[in-house]
Amino acid sequence: MTQEELKKHCLKQVEACEMWARHNGEEPHGKVYEEHKLILELLEQQPFINKPCISEGVCREDKMQVLDKIRAEIVELRSRQNVGVLECLDIIDKYRTESEEMYE
């Protein structure tokens, strides 16, 4: 799945959750809604994802490794506790700082 396909999928899921919530007179909520919103935020916040590279192959590999680390850390937290959005954002911010330092 490409980054653009992932973004489209997440937007579709968020929209479906929002529609369901409106139909029931509620605010959007729940695990599916929160996780897809989080992924969308990750895609928007990570400066390294769209950063131009000298060698596209090496840069792509670096990007995937960082995303794999973020995902693994979130999965590990989730297995131990009910991970909230704020904890996930802390993880994203940690790796964003590392990636920005790498490209300075």
Image (tube, rainbow, N blue to C red):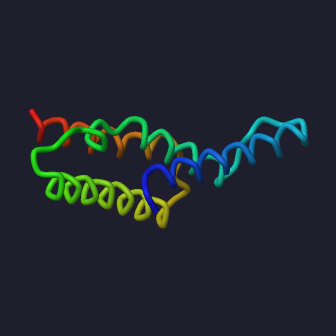
In the displayed structure image, the side of residue 5 where residue 102 appears, left or right:
left
In the displayed structure image, the side of residue 3 where residue 9 appears, left or right:
right
- Reply above or below: 99 against 72: above
Q: Residue at x 47, y 64 (%)?
A: 80
Q: Residue at x 75, y 48 (%)?
A: 16
Quadrant the C terminus occupies: top left
From the top left corner, tell me how far across and down residue 70 is, in percent.
Answer: 34, 54
From the top left corner, tell me how far across and down residue 11 is, in percent.
Answer: 61, 45
Which residue is more in the foreground, 3 or 72?
A: 3
Residue 54 appears in which quarter of the rendering?
A: top left
Figure disc tally: 0
From the top left corner, tell me how far across and down residue 68 is, in percent.
Answer: 32, 61
Q: Residue at x 65, y 54 (%)?
A: 32
The single residue placed furthest to the right in the displayed view is 24
- Reply above or below: 89 against 60: above
The single residue placed furthest to the top in the displayed view is 104
- Reply above or below: 14 against 67: above
From the top left corner, tell me how far across and down residue 101 is, in percent.
Answer: 13, 36
Which residue is more in the foreground, 102 or 82?
A: 102
